Every structure is written in structure tokens, then in C-alpha cells.
Amino acid sequence: MSTQQEGPNIDYSDSRRITVAQLVDLLRRSTLAERRLIEDEACMAAMLKHADILATAWDGERLVGAARSLTDFAYCCYLSELAVGSAYQHRGIGRALISLTESRLAPGTKVILLSAPAAVDYYPKIGFTGHPSEWTRAKRPKTFS
């Protein structure tokens, strides 16, 4: 599915594939690179290959936003990355990427995410509810094999 929204001529898609280089570039421009293994090309490739939903935002041929999710499409959807290039933020692109992601899910499916520290105040403004606990554990070393 591909749509165009009014405003800064941004095209949205949930079928357009992206390269590892495009994802890494976007993560750098969005500040998420500091929390991702961007130097591990195999890990980045696996992240793209195994995503259940990849919603993207394009300004012409330039990737300006992406929402990558893992989901069962019925009960829960983990929105692992929501990245919008810094120059494109505050234009509704993140909200549109979440909406496109949600359009692929059954009604009532929970969207779950972990916020970057700089975005903690953003998610309540767009309808997300905080949760008092979070549990994470890395089961592998910092390099992907």
C-alpha cells in the first residue's frame, strides 16, 4: 500500500523495501543510531529481513521515516523502531507511520514500544499510555552472528 499525504509531499508505504544503508542513514539522521548496532551490517540486515511490518515515509527518493514492527497481527505489535529524520520531525510523519502500521493490525491489537529518552513526552501526546515496568535482557553479545 502506498499513499500520499498533504503537506510536505511525503509518500507513505508499507510495501516498499529499503536497504541496510538507507536504514542506517535514517537512524543517524534521527538520533536512534546511538542505541542501535549500526556497525553490525548482518544485524541490521536481519532487522529488515525479519520485520513483520515496515512502514516508510519518502520525500521523493529519500527515506525520511520508518516504523519497523514485529507482530502476531492479532494480540500485540512491538514497534521496535520509529525513526524520523531530524529535519522532518514535528510534521506528523511519526504519527502517520504509526497509523499505517496500525492499519495492518486486527482491531484491538496492542502496539507496544520502548521510547528513546528524548521521545518520552511525545508518545502520551499521541494516545499512548505509559507502563510502570519494563524488563529487558540481551541474550547475545553486542555483535550479531
Image (tube, rainbow, N blue to C red):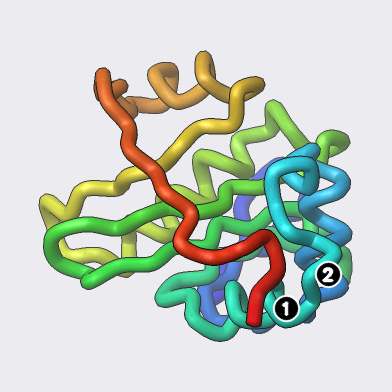
Work out whether residue 65 can be spotted: yes
Looking at the picture, does residue 115 appear above or below residue 113?
above
Residue drawn at x 52%, y 20% as measured from the top left: 120
Q: Nearer the viewer, residue 90 or 54?
A: 54
Q: Nearer the viewer, residue 43 or 17?
A: 43
Looking at the picture, does residue 52 appear above or below residue 100?
below
Work out whether residue 8 can be spotted: no
Q: Which x, y percent locates residue 74?
A: 14, 66
User: Which quarter of the picture shows residue 88?
Assistant: top right
Residue drawn at x 57%, y 85% as measured from the top left: 49
The C terminus lies in quadrant: bottom right
How many other residues sit within 10 Å of disc 2, few (<14), some (14-19) or many (≥20)? few
User: Which quarter of the picture shows residue 135?
Assistant: top left
* Mark 2: secondary structure: helix
Residue 100 relative to residue 116: left or right: left
How many other residues sit within 10 Å of disc 1, few (<14), some (14-19) or many (≥20)? few
Looking at the picture, does residue 122 appear above or below residue 101?
above
Looking at the picture, does residue 21 appear above or below residue 99?
below
- The kind of residue tagged 2 is Gln
Q: Which x, y percent locates residue 29?
A: 86, 45
Q: Which x, y percent locates residue 97?
A: 53, 52
Q: Which x, y percent locates residue 123?
A: 45, 25
User: Which quarter of the picture shows residue 89?
Assistant: top right
Residue drawn at x 32%, y 32% as measured from the top left: 134
Residue underneath mark 2? 22
Q: Are marks 2 and 1 in contact (CB under 8 Å)?
A: yes
Q: Tag on residue 86?
A: none
Residue underneath mark 1? 18
Residue drawn at x 58%, y 42% as measured from the top left: 94
Residue 145 relative to residue 126: left or right: right
- The kind of residue tagged 1 is Ile
Q: Nearer the viewer, residue 67 or 137?
A: 137
